Image: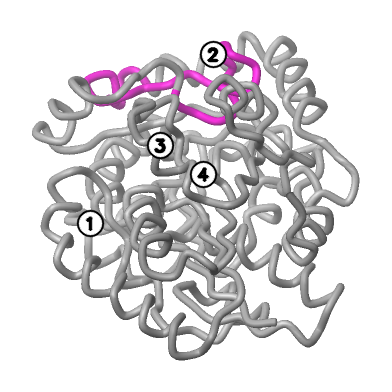
Amino acid sequence: MKIFVSAGEVSGDLHLSYLVKNILEIDSSVKFYGAAGDLSRAAGVEIVQDIKELAVMGFVEGLKKYSFLKKRAKEYLNFIKENKIDKVILVDYGGFNLAFLKLLKSEVPEVEVYFYIPPKLWVWGEKRINTLKLADHILVIFPWEVEFYKKHGIKAVYYGNPFSEKYHLIENRGDKILLLPGSRKQEIQFLMPVMLEVVKARPEKTFVLKLHSAKPFEWVENDLLKYPNLVIETNKTLEEIVKECETAIAASGTVTLELALMGIPAIVLYKTSAVNAFIARHILKIGLVSLPNLTLNKEVYPELLQEKCTSRDVLFYLNVLKSKEDKINKDIKEIREKLSGENVVKNYGKYILKGQN
């Protein structure tokens, strides 16, 4: 069996790597090809397009890359036709993958398509639901999505959240503060100045800055080495660093859920350009944005978005987290309970191999 995969960001590549690993454990003869990153490559995907070139953040940046992505979609389609691909797995990356899904079903309708982790249509609006319906199977990783899609006449498959198997509760942690500014150039450039102001304001605390690589040093104007209470980590795993920390300050995204499953309180940050923010306010259904908060439908982690994303607000909420520690810990444990399942990724893999309706 030949399977083409399409992921576009680090978080999607991470989820895809778990899925590929589990499918190959079930059937080692399956061949994977597609757009993915280093994690999926290591799991067994033959890379057609490296996702390092695909990451897009914001509406303006998306428009700039439109022609590039359109060209990629046609290349993927030709690859699928030429190599007689049996199934396609689309992983998150909604802007591109929804357009690619439409192209796929118009050109090769016989190819079975699985949308694993579909785009957050409850945030982006429900107009694109008809495009999503073109997929043969919708596989979701949050319990509330099942009801959301059912309302639109779509059967969504849910076995649990894959991260509930990977990340375990870490108790007896240290007293440092973890900084997670994200992986994209734009978010790092917007969030690092805020984080560094916090580092400067709290000289008595040790901060640990977790970066995916040394590349962000080129994107930040400040000399990161001039802060005596800042430790920079590019090699340690997230779990290793969480063991050293009491609190985290993190870019909005998948990492906030990883933090919750490990039991560490966090503040969620999101900041983008004024143009992107203006567009977002007019087309997005913005309520709660972080995955831990969406899971319980209440604010467990403070969300500091756009104008509220300031060092002053971060410093204030660091004190709030400390004062509400017991309540937050109780909520964090409830998040884990809601997202847990048995053999989660293995069951998604079995479903894809079987191709059941």
Q: Earlier in the sequence, mark 4 or mark 3?
A: 4
Res. 225 in view:
no
Q: Is residue 157 above or below residue 38?
A: above
Q: Is residue 62 above or below residue 132?
A: below
Q: Secondary structure at mark 3?
A: helix
Identify the residue shown where x is 48% and y is 51%: 92
Q: Position of residue 43 (x, y in %)?
A: 67, 78
- Which is more foreground, mark 2 or mark 3? 3
Identify the residue shown where x is 71% and y is 47%: 163
Residue sitting nearer the eye, 92 or 214: 92
The amino acid on which the numbered mark 4 sits, given as a three-letter code, is Pro
Q: Position of residue 119 (x, y in %)?
A: 45, 41
- Which is more foreground, mark 1 or mark 3? 3
The residue carrying pointer 2 sits among few (fewer than 14), some (14 to 19) or many (20 or more) residues within 10 Å by Cα, namely some
Residue stretch rendered in magenta on the structure:
289-313
The residue carrying pointer 1 sits among few (fewer than 14), some (14 to 19) or many (20 or more) residues within 10 Å by Cα, namely some
Q: Secondary structure at mark 4?
A: loop
Q: Which mark is residue 299?
A: 2
Q: Earlier in the sequence, mark 1 or mark 4?
A: 4
Asked whether the residues under the numbered discs 4 and 3 touch, taking CB atoms below 8 Å apart as contact, a structural biologist would say: no
Q: CA distance from mark 2 to mark 3?
A: 31 Å
The amino acid on which the numbered mark 1 sits, given as a three-letter code, is Val
Q: Position of residue 61 (x, y in %)?
A: 16, 52
Q: Position of residue 240 (x, y in %)?
A: 70, 56
Identify the residue shown where x is 66% and y is 28%: 146
Res. 281 in view:
yes
Quadrant of the rendering where the N terminus is positioned: bottom right
Q: Which residue is mark 4?
A: 118
